[in-house]
Amino acid sequence: MSATLYTIGFTRKGAERFFGLLTDAGVRRVLDIRARPDSQLAGFARGPDLAWFLRRLCNIEYHTVPALAPGKQLLADYRAGTVDWDAYTSRYLAELDPHRAQQALAALDLDRACLLCAEDSAAQCHRRLAAEWLQQRQPGLQLVHLC
């Protein structure tokens, strides 16, 4: 049986839809791969609040995985428009430290886990890049982007 790794972004989703998508998919743990999970701008998806909501409303574990977050300079460059998506992709993948990422994920079962970021769509988001990177290292891992 193959494992399934989900991804989700919280932007443009109300709490009901966000938690409903996770619950309906049968997600067991959320892996927060944002550079700043504690941002005040994240609303219900702010790290400490999100951990509580996931546990109480959905019985879903919450873990931060900074090893899969983009670097601060890369984010700043992308937001400033000094790098396009292709350059962002190359830099993100080059900056990933396989040892650090594998070490961070070693104790976490990826089956029915969900990578969390802010972007509404996975098309141009590092969570898709991270998911595909993990898929290359775990043959048979199925990816599902919740939207």
Image: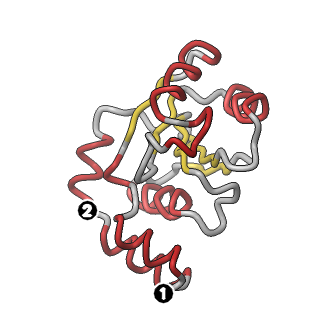
From the top left corner, tell me how far across and down residue 70 is, in percent.
Answer: 40, 62
Residue at (53%, 40%) from the top-left corner?
3
128 sits to left or right of 138? right
Looking at the rendered structure, the secondary structure element under dot 1 is loop
From the top left corner, tell me how far across and down residue 14 is, in percent.
Answer: 76, 36
Looking at the rendered structure, the secondary structure element under dot 2 is loop
Residue at (42%, 80%) from the top-left corner?
90
| For residue 139, above or below residue 3 | below
Q: Earlier in the sequence, mark 2 or mark 1?
A: 1
| For residue 88, above or below residue 136 | below
| For residue 31, above or below residue 11 | above
In the image, what residue type sits under mark 2? Asp
For this orientation, the residue located farthest to the front is: 40
> What residue would you read off at disc 1?
82
- Mark 2 and mark 1: Cα distance apart in space: 23 Å
- Res. 95 image quadrant: bottom left
From the top left corner, tell me how far across and down residue 63 is, in percent.
Answer: 41, 33
Q: How many marks?
A: 2
| For residue 108, above or below residue 103 | above
> What residue would you read off at disc 2?
97
User: Badges 2 and 1: C-beta atoms under 8 Å apart?
Assistant: no
Q: Quadrant of the N terminus?
A: top right
Residue at (45%, 43%) from the top-left corner?
37
Q: Nearer the viewer, residue 54 or 14?
A: 14
In the image, what residue type sits under mark 1? Thr
**Few, some or many residues within 10 Å of mark 2 (<14, 14–19, 20+):** few
**Few, some or many residues within 10 Å of mark 1 (<14, 14–19, 20+):** few
123 sits to left or right of 109? right
- Res. 92 image quadrant: bottom left
